[in-house]
Amino acid sequence: MRMSRYFLPVLKEDPAEAAIVSHRLMLRAGMIKQSSAGIYSWLPMGYKVLRKIEDIVHEEQAKAGHMPMLMPTIQSADLWRESGRYDDYGEEMLRIKDRHDRDMLFTPTAEELITDIFRSHVSSYKDLPLTLYQIQWKFRDERRPRFGVMRGREFYMKDGYNFDLTKEDALHAYNRHLVSYLRTYERMGLQAIPMRADSGPIGGDDTHEFLVLAETGESEVFYDSAVTDLTFGDREIDFDDVAQCQSIMEEFTTKYARTDETHDEALFNEVPEERRRTARGIEVGQIFYFGTKYSDAMNAKVQGPDGKPVAVHMGSHGIGVSRLLGAIIEASHDDKGIIWPEGVTPYHVGIVNLKQGDEEADTACESLYKEFTAAGLEPLYDDRKERAGGKFATMDLIGLPWRITVGPRGLKNGVVELTSRKTGESTEMTPAEAVARVKDIYAGA
Ligand code: ATP
Ligand code: MG
């Protein structure tokens, strides 16, 4: 992409409405624009990161054997009356009437709809286990939409649903989701700690929330500092291996880590004092096992091995895809702007031409641009006739992890400069070396 043709409406001033850094930086970097309270347009740069995050979620779900699909945002109230949640959900549900005066709603979650699909098409235990998911817009009429995409009213969410014959199988699905979520967040450069949680209106027995530690987080959290030493890394995993998923689950959930909703002071005090931490966190996902709550209410049964009908065991599993943009920025920024982790960066490398119009500099930049593109990487080339200082400030604000600076002076010596956004460190090298270095970095990412 060439900056001269890009739609990147960066703001010079800090927007007054933004109370936290991620919201401020997303507005300043021209990623989003509020359309009404808690509802945003995603401008090209924001949309690009949203899609990157979505891609990672899809890739990791595929590895776990879960199937993507798509359900409508507008649903009939009838299914929600069957489960009893039409009345229970309260004011967070956006209720709509169609021209025939029928009650409709904008989906805040989709347990009812997926259960209806399931019961219409699955009748034998032989078709289990089954896990379906979607990434779709949700609407919750939050009392206090705030912090930009962190607490929107319209937001983008991955919601997955497992159907199993037994509780044991459903708990394996639960563990499988926990493991795949750990991988998903790590690929985004985040440490998201599974914490024992409260089930809220979805209802259920077992549930964990994934929290990213950040001062601006809405949840108060209590944990054993040893949990922050755990990383998933690049270990091999077989998602059908019940014992392996179980042992990883235990590794990540046995140490004390809870939100204020489930916090137990007496248990917390058993953690050695020097390891007890109280902090704030951003909830980026949640997994639930809720047994036959919906399958009983909605009569979702299959024929079991003995020929008798049994209600299926279910769980649901969510990732806050749009909230993740905010969470990643909260976890990774400095006073100049965003610092994108390599896994989600909108463009892999920025090219800054210090002297647009200088033949040699222009030619060097064009050839870098072509080489990166040919290598399957996406460069963002600042080809505007602007002062170098302004170009650097924009690159720092939008936060691409790597920048190549090209100017006539360096080119006289055959070199350009490669700069890390994170450390600020710059190294001179030939253009060919810079291309090779950046290709190398992303080959491993
Ligand atoms: P919260 O406690 O933050 O209101 P929740 O527990 O009601 O969230 P879930 O039903 O678990 O939300 O939804 C799955 C994920 O969707 C959450 O973990 C969160 O990351 C995201 N999410 C929920 N509500 C919002 C919102 N209003 N804006 C943006 N993301 C949200
Ligand atoms: Mg939740």
Image (cartoon, grey):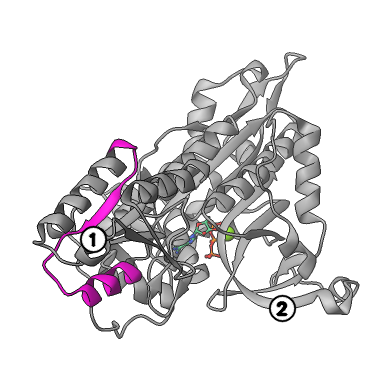
Q: Amino acid at mark 2?
A: Thr
Q: Of residues 403 and 201, which is closer to you in this image?
A: 403
- Does residue 200 belong to the magenta stretch? no
Measuring from the top left, give residue 368's x and y in whole percent: 26, 48
Residue at figure coordinates x 34%, y 49% from the top left:
104
Q: Which residues are magenta?
A: 374-397
Task: Name the residue that disc number 2 marks.
Answer: 278
Front residue of this view, candidates 372 and 154? 372
Q: Which residue is mark 1?
A: 412
Does the rendering let one see residue 344? yes
Q: Residue extending furthest front?
A: 413
Report helix, strand or loop for mark 2. Answer: strand
Q: Residue 69's quadrant in the figure?
A: top left
Q: Which mark is residue 389?
A: none
The residue closer to the viewer here, 161 or 402, is 402
The CA span between labels 1 and 2 is 55 Å
